[in-house]
Image: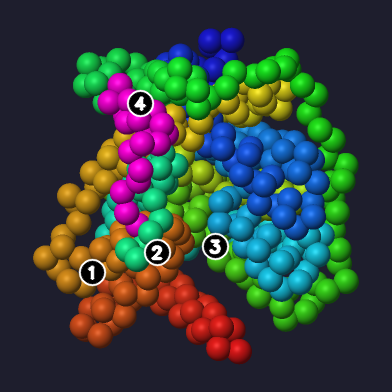
Amino acid sequence: MKNLLEKTFKLSENNTTIRRELVAGLITFLTMSYILIVNPSILSSTGMDKDALFTSTALATIFATLMMALYAKLPIAQAPGMGLNSFFAFSVVLGMGYSWQMALTAVFIEGIIFILLTFFNIRELIVKSIPKVLKEAIPVGIGLFITLIGLKGAGIVVANENTLMSIGDFSQHSVWIALLGLFVTAVLFVRNVNGSILIGIIVATIFGIILGDVRLPDTSIISTPPSIAPIFAQFEWSNIFSLKMLIVVFTFLFVNLFDTVGTLIGVVSKAGLADENGNFPQMKKALFADALGTTVGAVLGTSTITSYVESASGVASGGRTGLTAVSTAIMFALALFLAPLFLMVPAAATSPALIIVGLFMISSVAKINFNDMSEGLPAFLTIVFMPFTYSIAEGIVFGMLSFAFIKVCSGKYKDVSTTVYVIAALFLLKIVLDALHVIG
């Protein structure tokens, strides 16, 4: 088995070990396992069966993550995307009035289109055309974004009507659970202890049990997964050629493309698997894994699949190959039968991992030349728009638009590739359409 894993994932070549990869996969699972709770909660607001959604979420995650592991050989996990599931539920179904079956159909169509775009190298062309300065800025923005997710999940940062955000209530146990986990993780990192992020999560969870915020399972921790029959392949084809459906499919395409691109560039760069321009040899395979995951996910009954930025926590713990993603998929498979045990880990206990990873990901900011306004401002907008709009995609949109606009207007139009012009025009068109939709 050891020789098979070595041959399949080239562990020695990537300077890693089986143990390190398995631990990294477990950490990735713990930092993103919240999707098993959140995705069913959001999508069930449309009338979909919540129990069935738990199973479909896990199955779609397992399939898509194994595709990334075994085909692309990357330490990146995939699951139903946050933001995309909200768009599915609150915009398409509850807002536009479509049935959830129609929304699933749109996701399925999007997946098919992505498969075709990937096959003809169009998605890869788009990724490679992103300017180098923005490829440096994207990991920084993602780092700040996932740090904000971690702070929010712990209650250290909370919403505020007057200031948008403010410091949380330090009388809440979740704050101290997260701070203890952060302190333990940081100390262990300084002392070069392997698996320090995982140990921090375990210590924080135990502290939560002591405080009474985390309850041990009352019943058996082993249970049979609910059936996905109520939502399996429930497609509706009657209105697929309508203008509204075209807008829905385009929006799914747009958000998923650039969320995935942003995550791939950020995580792969941090793993040291990308070249100086932010490109990596498995790019096409990674994009194909994402496209196929979305298509199969729709059949299973869940919203769009995307690469997860939380994969950076596993990379920060030493994950370098697809074996990390295999480990994550195995954890999700176990979660199908051991949900009470795995889901007892509170968000506050996983928050320190996101904060620590955020620290690691901002290091590439030192490579950006902020003295050159034509590159510094687009990079800056890319970085700040991600956390401030709570969207990786929006950061890329405004980074690309500002890059193209400033370069052209300052006479440096040769720095802008034809693909960037096309992408910027599409971004501008989408913004205009969104504005007209709001006005209308």
Q: Residue at x 25, y 85 (%)?
A: 409
The count of marks equals: 4
The Cα–Cα distance between marks 4 and 1, rounded to whole angstroms, is 36 Å
Q: In the rendering, which numbered label is found on residue 255?
A: 3
Label 3 and label 4: CA atoms lie apart by 33 Å
The crowding category of the residue bearing disc 2, from other C-alpha atoms within 10 Å (few below 14, some 14 to 19, many at least 20), is few
Residue 328 x, y percent position in the rendering: 56, 28
Amino acid type indicated by mark 2: Glu
Secondary element type, mark 4: helix
The residue drawn where x is 59% and y is 18% is 216
Closer to the camera in the image, 322 or 248? 248
The residue under label 1 is 377
Residue lying at 72% horizontally and 55% vertically, measured from the top left? 45
What is the distance, in whole Å, between disc 4 and disc 2 at their CAs? 29 Å
Amino acid beneath label 3: Val
The residue under label 2 is 161
Task: Return the disc, 3 or 4, that comes first in the chain's sequence.
Answer: 4
Which residue is the extreme one toward the left? 371
Q: Is residue 334 visible?
A: no
Which residue is located at x 87 percent, y 46 percent?
230
Residue type at mark 1 is Leu
**Spatial distance from mark 2 to mark 3, Cα to Cα?**
28 Å
- Report the predominant secondary structure element of the magenta stretch: helix
State whether residue 199 is above or below residue 97: above
Q: Nearer the viewer, mark 4 or mark 1?
A: 4
Which amino acid type corresponds to the residue marked 4 in the rendered image?
A: Gly
Q: Position of residue 77 (x, y in %)?
A: 54, 37
Q: Say which residue label 4 marks.
A: 181
Q: Of marks 1 and 2, which one's residue comes earlier in the chain?
A: 2
User: Of the residues tagged 1 and 2, which is closer to the observer?
Assistant: 2
Start-end of magenta stretch: 165-184
